[in-house]
Amino acid sequence: MEKENYKQKMLLAVVQGDDYLDTVDELTRNGFFATVLSSTGGFLKKRSVTLMIGVEAHRAQAALDILRQCAGRRQQMSYSNMSMSAGGPTASIPMVPVPITTGGVTVFMMDLNDIQKF
């Protein structure tokens, strides 16, 4: 069976709520249009946004690069106040930098036969 030549792709990108504004701005600056759907993560129950992005197949990688850059996983430093208690008075230790992973985007890519705008 011959594979059809799809010229359009639909990207469904699930982005953390904190990352979506910068992501949508960068997509728009680069000529991509996204429909924003409010969603909630199933595992952590955190606010997320699902972006529906219709793109020509040859531009899909550029859109994926923007998603990775603006909403992909990254390391950030967070400062934690650790304290020790051994039954007596609490001794405070200065804030300690702790690396944490933040961000993350899940992308579903589908072939489309057609995209129409009216």
Image: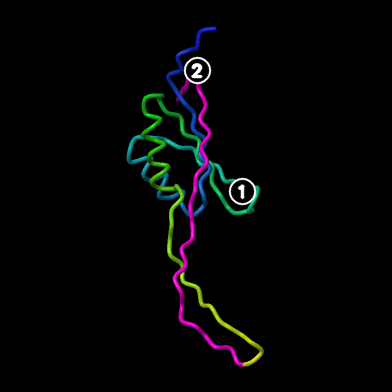
Name the kind of residue labelled 1 in the image: Gly
| Quadrant in the rendering for residue 29 | top left
Direction from residue 29 to residue 92 in the image, left or right: right
Direction from residue 28 to residue 99 in the image, left or right: right
Question: What element does badge 2 sit on?
Answer: loop
User: In this view of the protein, which residue sits in the foreground, 42 or 23?
Assistant: 42
Residue drawn at x 46%, y 50% is: 73
Question: From this viewpoint, which residue is outermost toward the bottom?
Answer: 89
Residue drawn at x 40%, y 50% is: 22
| Quadrant in the rendering for residue 27 | top left
The magenta segment is 89-118
Label 1: few (<14), some or many (≥20) within 10 Å? few
Query: Horizontal and vertical percent for residue 20?
Result: 46, 48
Name the kind of residue labelled 2 in the image: Asn
Residue 20 visible in rendering: yes
How many numbered marks appear?
2
Instruction: Give the number of the mark in front: 2 or 1.
Output: 1
Name the quadrant of the C terminus. top left
The residue pinned by badge 1 equals 41
The residue pinned by badge 2 equals 113
Residue 118 visible in rendering: no
Query: Horizontal and vertical percent for residue 102?
Result: 48, 56
Label 2 close to label 1 by CB (< 8 Å) = no
User: In this view of the protein, which residue sits in the foreground, 96 or 47?
Assistant: 96
| Quadrant in the rendering for residue 64 | top left
Q: In the rendered image of this protein, does residue 99 appear above or below residue 24?
A: below
Pointer 2 or 1: first along the chain: 1
